[in-house]
Image: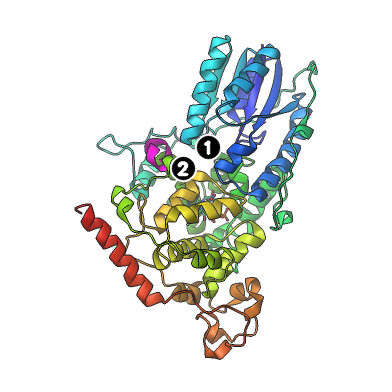
């Protein structure tokens, strides 16, 4: 049989169920990647992520060629035209079976359904697998048979049902005969966009990803519980870009973490338990996306928050985008993202809360800004993070619990080292003043005055939420 593996967010050989199924069932396999620039833009995905994608495809091509599988790049106009592009290619190549791993976004599910139907009309089978989660999305249910919308009970159920054989997976050992008549053609994809973030921080390929995972687990994971909130300690794994494009699988991450903790989820080393929790958070947000289609349609999880009167100020937005709000920890976080394509989790929460509460700007604008700059841009985690911070989401921060960026800065960057790293204008400011907005003590520094008053803006946000609740009769 002749088959296709359609690669999407699973750019790896290790723990790839679609690839394994194709190798088990077919004697000739082609790999394809279908790229659509316009779809990339509709989803606001960043230029650094696009460059990272192309670099990883090059690495993947090498690994696939070792198995005698050519990687063919196909350009599509959009998800609308893609099923026809896929089907025409499959018919032309006399393909009998297409294999892929599921993506859970609403548009992606429609794209796959349309592809499946069109292939079926041409007598081509379509099989899909779940590689991004341990449990099929929607499988774990509350006692009332409903989808979970709160993390803690979801995690409890996740652990209760867990069996170690869920983490059994193969990596391909079978090499096909070299009988392909078609050659890899990645040159059909060209990276033409520009960005100023440092892509060298993110070496491409599965070996690099596994090396990052190994280094983290060996030297940082045990201390993760204490160090994960400190941006200057850099105590997290930084594997999110690799998970977002599927260069590393969540199963591999959980398996390697468990090996270090005697296969315990809730006892043993607290750092490893906490780190595995974070991978489960990722799965939780994928379940939310699967079970509540509204989050894929630009809607808040909490319906009443549709009535919030968000502000809009182009000057404030401009200052925010440039990392010039006059609040050092907020600006340092934004500038880290502009410089590295990545932002520390603690700062993502601080920045998103400042944007949606103190600035009282619509979370969707912030969500888009992050997607446009993050190398790890991932719809469900980003949407989940923004909706958590803006109190519009599932399991969110209560609307009246608003982080104070100055206290956050004092707690998590006590010596101001992170601020000084990303805001060199403040390098000579004494530690006692570094967390505060600009005042007389460092008036000479070339750094903006604060765009807002923290106390007033906090009260304004609480009132806006109260008004929305009243309008909705809550
Ligand atoms: C406003 C906001 C936006 C976010 N946008 C994204 C995004 O676009 N892409 C993304 O991958 N993560 C996003 N996150 C979650 C989190 O900030 C990043 O996953 C984390 O900072 C990545 O760094 P790491 O790989 O070192 O994480 P580690 O701390 O080492 O955690 C390991 C992995 O667990 C997952 N994870 C960790 N924290 C979370 C979380 N809160 N929610 C879901 N998964 C998590 C990630 O896949 C991460 O790589 C966002 C969080 C917030 C508050």
**Residue at position x 46%, y 46% from top?**
280
**Residue 356 drawn above or below residue 458:** above
Give the residues in magenta.
289-295
The residue singled out by tag 1 in the image is 132
Figure check: 145 above or below 283: above
Q: Which mark is residue 283?
A: 2
Q: In this view, does 260 lie to the left or right of 307?
A: right
Q: Earlier in the sequence, mark 2 or mark 1?
A: 1
Q: Does the magenta stretch include residue 291?
A: yes
- What x and y, as percent, mark residue 416? 57, 77
Can I make out residue 378 in this image? Answer: yes
Find numbered disc 1 in the image and state the secondary structure of the residue it sits on: loop
Q: In this view, does 367 lie to the left or right of 202?
A: left
Image coords of residue 24 (percent x, y): 64, 18
Which part of the image, by quadrant, shows the C terminus?
bottom left
Helix or strand or loop: what does disc 2 sit on?
helix
Q: Which residue is more in the foreground, 221 or 98?
A: 98
- Residue found at the very far left of the displayed protein: 473
User: CB atoms at circles 2 and 1 under 8 Å apart?
Assistant: yes
Residue at 58% in and 12% down: 124
């Amino acid at each position: 049989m002749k088959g296709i593996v359609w690669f999407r967010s699973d750019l790896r050989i290790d723990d790839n169920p679609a690839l394994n199924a194709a190798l088990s069932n077919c004697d000739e396999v082609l790999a394809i990647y279908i790229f659509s620039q316009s779809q990339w833009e509709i989803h606001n995905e960043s230029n650094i992520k696009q460059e990272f994608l192309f670099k990883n495809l090059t690495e993947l091509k090498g690994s696939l060629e070792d198995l005698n599988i050519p990687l063919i790049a196909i350009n599509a106009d959009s998800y609308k035209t893609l099923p026809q592009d896929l089907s025409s290619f499959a018919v032309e190549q006399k393909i009998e079976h297409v294999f892929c791993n599921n993506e859970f976004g609403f548009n992606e599910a429609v794209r796959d359904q349309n592809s499946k139907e069109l292939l079926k009309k041409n007598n081509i089978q379509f099989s899909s697998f779940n590689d991004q989660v341990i449990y099929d999305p929607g499988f774990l249910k509350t006692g009332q048979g409903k989808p979970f919308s709160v993390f803690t009970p979801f995690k409890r159920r996740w652990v209760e049902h867990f069996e170690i054989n869920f983490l059994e997976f193969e990596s391909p050992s079978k090499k096909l005969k070299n009988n392909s008549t078609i050659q890899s053609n990645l040159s059909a994809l060209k990276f033409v966009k520009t960005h100023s973030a440092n892509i060298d921080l993110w070496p491409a390929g599965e070996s690099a990803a596994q090396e990052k995972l190994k280094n983290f687990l060996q030297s940082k994971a045990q201390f993760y519980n204490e160090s994960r909130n400190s941006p200057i300690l850099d105590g997290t794994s930084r594997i999110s870009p690799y998970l977002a494009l599927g260069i590393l699988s969540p199963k591999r991450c959980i398996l390697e973490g468990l090996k270090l903790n005697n296969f315990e989820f809730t006892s043993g080393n607290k750092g490893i338990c906490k780190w595995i929790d974070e991978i489960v958070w990722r799965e939780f947000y994928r379940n939310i996306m699967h079970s509540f289609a509204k989050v894929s349609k630009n809607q808040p999880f909490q319906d009443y928050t549709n009535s919030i009167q968000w502000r809009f100020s182009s000057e404030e937005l401009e200052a925010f985008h440039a990392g010039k709000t006059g609040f050092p920890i907020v600006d340092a976080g934004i500038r880290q993202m502009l410089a590295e394509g990545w932002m520390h989790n603690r700062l993502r929460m601080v920045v998103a809360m400042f944007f949606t509460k103190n600035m009282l700007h619509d979370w969707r604008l912030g969500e888009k800004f992050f997607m446009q700059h993050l190398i790890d841009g991932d719809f469900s985690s980003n949407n989940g993070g923004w909706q958590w911070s803006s109190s519009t989401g599932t399991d969110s921060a209560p609307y009246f619990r608003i982080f104070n960026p100055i206290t956050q800065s004092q707690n998590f960057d006590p010596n101001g080292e992170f601020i000084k790293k990303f805001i060199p204008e403040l390098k000579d400011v004494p530690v006692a003043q570094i967390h505060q907005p600009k005042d007389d003590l460092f008036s000479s520094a070339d750094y903006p005055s604060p765009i807002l008053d923290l106390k007033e803006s906090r009260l304004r946000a609480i009132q806006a939420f109260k008004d929305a609740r009243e309008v909705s009769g809550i």
